[in-house]
Image (cartoon, rainbow, N blue to C red):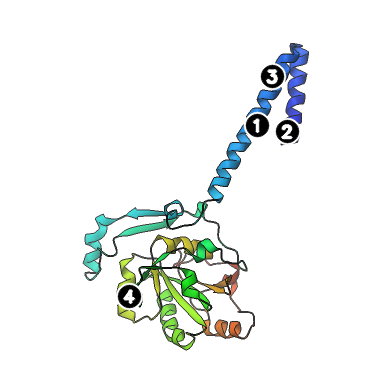
Amino acid sequence: MFTLILLLIKDIIKTRLYRENNLLKTLTAVFVSMFSLCSAQSVETRADAGQSAKKITRENIPFFVDIIDKKENSREQLMYYPNADLEKYPVFQYRAKIDRIRPLKVGKNVPDEIWDLPVRIVGDIRGRDSITLRELAADKILVLDFWAKWCSPCLKSMNKWKELQPKYKGEVQVVGLMLDWDYKAELMIHKMGWNMPQLIGPEVYLLNYYFCGTPVTGPSAWINKGKFIGLSDARADSEKIINNLLLGLPPSFSENGDRKLKKGKEEL
């Protein structure tokens, strides 16, 4: 910035003195140019700071996620899913605004704004409508499994957790985060007999991009002692990862652990 101003002053002085020999006009031009540059940089800095400083809260979710009312599709949804409770779970479409979300790097601590973000929970045994990741994790290893009804590897992964969760209930908390129409979570819980908490809504789409670095179904995000430790895909040996963590060994994530997610049918 300073170098640019010096070059500008040199150019203006050279032009003005040789052509008009008017010192007052020269100095005026210099100060006007300097003010314009500083003002432009200030506006740009404020704009960048304003976007990056936007706090992730429930009230600010529309800044990070598009929430589109698709109630015109309600009749069509009921044709395929007549038991869907569309009064409790209206038909909304969500899309993460990826230019406004900065993904968390593996190895970094999960910030408080993510820990304490209320997310809608389905079928909670305590009757709660929303819950936070902090409440879900307590002092356990937290596994966030991102799934959708149309993703067959995701369903196999959730069925796998159905068997593993009771075995490790004292050390691990698995949570399903559904990337599909909200009403489907409740239907799938009843159909599949899943025993893990299920989260829905726009916050899930934010968390999906925040941890996975791309809108995708299939991966599970692992959090241990407040730190994001990596990603596993739907076909990973989750029990081996758990046992390694409990023994204090490296978790042995696949290449997905450093966010090299393969683009495929499971990508949104």
Residue drawn at the location 64% of the way across and 79% of the way down: 250
On the image, numbered disc 1 is attached to which residue?
Answer: 37
Q: Residue 114 at x, y = what percent? A: 51, 63
Q: Residue 1 at x, y = what percent? A: 71, 36
Q: Earlier in the sequence, mark 2 or mark 3?
A: 2
- Give the secondary structure at mark 4: helix
Q: CA distance from mark 2 to mark 4?
A: 62 Å
- The amino acid beneath tag 3 is Thr
Residue drawn at the location 40% of the way across and 60% of the way down: 202
Query: Which image quarter: residue 120?
Result: bottom left
In the drawing, does residue 92 fall left or right of residue 141? left
In the image, residue 100 above or below residue 29? below
Residue drawn at the location 60% of the way across and 41% of the way down: 45
On the image, numbered disc 3 is attached to which residue?
Answer: 28
In the drawing, does residue 112 fall left or right of residue 121? right
On the image, numbered disc 4 is attached to which residue?
Answer: 188
Point out the frontmost of discs 1 and 2.
1
Q: Earlier in the sequence, mark 2 or mark 4?
A: 2
Q: Earlier in the sequence, mark 1 or mark 3?
A: 3
Q: Residue 34 at x, y = what percent? A: 68, 28
- Give the secondary structure at mark 1: helix
On the image, numbered disc 2 is attached to which residue?
Answer: 4
Q: CA distance from mark 4 to mark 3?
A: 72 Å
Q: CA distance from mark 1 to mark 2?
A: 9 Å
41, 131: nearer the viewer? 131
Query: Which image quarter: residue 242?
Result: bottom right
